[in-house]
Image (spheres, helix red, strand yellow):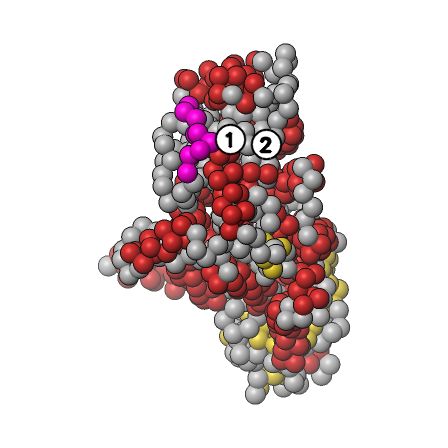
Amino acid sequence: MRRAAALLAVAAAAAAIDVQRLPAFFEQDIQLTIDNTVEYILEFTPTAEQAAWPSRVRLEASAADPAQPVLVTARQRIGAVTWQLPYRSRDGALLQQLQRTLCFNFTEGAPVAVDNGGAAFSLHVSSAGGGAVHVAARADPARDVLLDLDRPATVTVTQTATGVYYYGWGEESRVRLVMESEDDVCATLAVHNYTCPVAETAETISIGGLRMTVQRSGGINVARSQFPEGFYVMVLVQDTDGECSGEGDPGGDSDWLWEAALGAEDSARTEAPPTRAKTVTLTVRPALTRTQYAVASVVTLVIFLVFYAGFLALIFAQRYKPIKRLIAPKAVLADAKSGEDEVDAGVRRRRRGSDATFDSVDDDSESDEEPEPSQPAGQVAGQRQSAAAVNGAYSEDGTPGVAVISPAAPYDAGVVAPTSVTVVDSSPTTDANQDQCRPEAAAAVAPFGLPPRLRVAALARRGPRTRRARSDRYLHTLYTVAVFYALPVLQFVAAFQLVLNVWGSLDLCYYNFLCAHPLGQVSDFNHVLSNLGYLLLGALFMLQVRRRRARRRRKPRHEEYGIPAHYGLLSALGAGMMMVALLSASYHVCPNRLNFQFDTAFMYVLAVLSMVKIYQARHPDINARAHSTFGVLAVLIALVVWGVLGGGALFWGVFTVLHVFTFLLLSLHIYYVGQFRLDGSGLAEAARGLRSLPATRPLYVPRLVMLLIANAINWAFALYGLFSMPADFAGHLLQVLLCNTLLYMVFYLTMKLLHGERPRWYAWAFLAAAALAWAPALYFFVSGSSDWATTPALSRHRNHECRVLHFYDSHDLWHFLSAVALYLSFNTMLTWDDGLAAVKRTEIAVF
């Protein structure tokens, strides 16, 4: 009974409403006064010219009650749309005005007008409030709705009037929509297929299609396959700028949550703010053709294949003796009948086919080299005995002890040295410093019993098999880490690309939208392709190292001459470059804050391995092990994740302490040639040595100067990070590692020159070419084209048009140039000691 009574009451109220049907005309203002007793139906009939365009309807209600709003319904033959006035924006303000764009009429995929003479649409206006409300209505043909190819359209949109435009396909299958603006008002740029009603509210614009938040610029690639009937372009002005800037809170009031909890009403928020407006320029540009894709891809491939061609040309050129003499350094080959070779060969035969720790094949190598003129066997044996007399012995862990090797002690590379020996200076000494070379004087003057002069022979007591196995372990460890790191990365980025394609929010990925060219399911193919240089040049460098190892196997070197070979570590650098290609390409499938470490992880590996390689050249037996090195790298990557996802004052304080303390310990370890240990006795002995510096000359002056400079630079980095706390911690750490690597390379070359060592001409050529490549590469890296450390809209401020072949931007150029620079830098480290191949290790300085 109650239900029936309620229905009768509703029917009676409806019968009491006076429905007035009125004719209405386009481009005229219509004034209405309504309450709960009257409903108006306005029937808009266009002229022939007005009928050629869709309609925009704008209504404004004055003094309307939010609890009993004015209801508006626009009805067409193909659909209807309803809204109310006033409406509350997301910042809490009441807006009394609103504009809507009505649907197109479509025939065979193209918009057409309604029949001339019939009503285009009817507008139903009613209110549930008892008080009179004044409503102003107006309908206009949307003459600016169509976008043309390569014809910019400048329009102004407001918070209450979403800009809606349409593009119909011509012969093209893909276009690029570009939006530009001179103001920072936050807006959403969206592309939708034909739908009715038109999605032009904050709630409906995020359903389907493609969208992004924009301020100054934005770009969307649109394919005919996605929107076969053409597409709408919507520009929606946001209620606040918080979504673009990442600042502020709802309503811009820090107490909004507290007031909401208490039920308080902010009176200022009930008043409409000044209307937010934004002027934008929309341009639909043709996408690149298949020919342009092919040209860019082929040119990229050819550029890097030129390096392969140069490598092959150099190999064939060495068949001519004049060129071979110009390129190949002099070297002392091993005596085929020496006992050392027989012992090594016997060990190889015994271990071949077994599961021993060390490899059974000697893979160490150098470059194409010519041996020195043959030497008498007696002279070679005398040199070996001389080397044995001056080589210091080392314990199992590479640490010199306190006993002295007798000058008559036999030299045997396969025998483990005693566990308690002292390094004896192998350099010629004068009468003034001969006493210091004695064990008693050395222990009194230098901490840890170190001699005043070190030679490589004193730090190269391990056999070639041991050094080779330790060096190759870097490569094997890198392979293991790469496999377990890369597989989840590929799955992760594939999921990101799938989510992007389904969800449609382009704020998920930080592309350079003004120069992002899709291919298939990959939205930013050019940034993936530009990593080809890392892959090809890394593989080429590994081929060079492999060729040197093969030549060393055919022509073994004399173990008392030249820098000990560590080509497993060099091969690891080449493999690391190839991993940079894979991971950077994976990162650029959808670059964002969650997968940033994919792009930088193996750049850290290359920087650290480069420093290890430089140190290993002069300290063969006291270098860091592979597992320790990659353990440090794991800690670095963990710090990067913490710094980016949860960085703050606490993190930067902890990182600064770790940075400074770790570098101080590393400096002590380097200065005291690996003899320093972090314990009571080690700290006490190092402190005694440092306290004596003002009164006595430092034991190793150049090394001390280098470490002081390095500490000053690292302190500067640490303080800069502590006080500025940059959001891009990954980039900050990469800068620290690259700067230290560059500093170490400069120090190594400077010390070579100070000790009278002259790199071969081609090493200088590699170095000069690397410097020429690094300078523009770092410029393009700093300039950048996006910034995942900020909001997507602010990141798009750095977007710019393509700079090369209409295909590549500045970050692509960073990929190209840094790949070349890394390759040339690795070749510099590979060849800068070639001039020492015929120099005895007892004459090669340690620094």
Judge depth for marks 1 and 2 and give the one in front: 2
* Image-based side of 134 in relation to 379, left or right: right
Residue type at mark 2 is Ser
Tell which circle, 1 or 2, labels the residue nearer the N-terminal end.
2
Q: Which residues are magenta?
A: 400-410
> How far is disc 1 from disc 2 in space, using C-alphas?
17 Å
For the residue pair 196 and 778, the one nearer the viewer reads as 778
Report the residue at 57% width, 87% height from top.
108
Magenta segment: does it hold 263? Answer: no
SS at badge 2:
loop
Residue 427's disc number: 2
Residue 544 visible? yes
Q: Position of residue 844 (x, y in %)?
A: 59, 39
- Count numbered badges in the picture: 2
Residue 150 in the image: x percent, y percent? 74, 74
Q: Residue furthest left?
A: 1
Dividing the image into 4 quarters, which one contains the N terminus?
bottom left
Magenta stretch contains residue 404: yes
Which of the labelled discs sits on residue 673, or is there none? 1
Q: Position of residue 191 (x, y in %)?
A: 58, 68
Q: Toward the viewer: 818 or 171? A: 818
Quadrant assignment for the C terminus:
top right
Pick whichever, 761 or 715, lies toward us: 761
The residue positioned 45% from the left and 57% from the top of the image is 336
Based on the displayed image, in which of its 4 quarters is residue 331 positioned? bottom right
Whether 501 is drawn above or below 677: the answer is: below
**Which residue is at a point 64% across and 68% down the rendered structure image?**
318
Q: Nearer the viewer, residue 119 or 111?
A: 111
The residue depicted at 58 percent of the width and 56 percent of the height is 374
Q: Amino acid at mark 1?
A: Val
Report helix, strand or loop for mark 1. loop
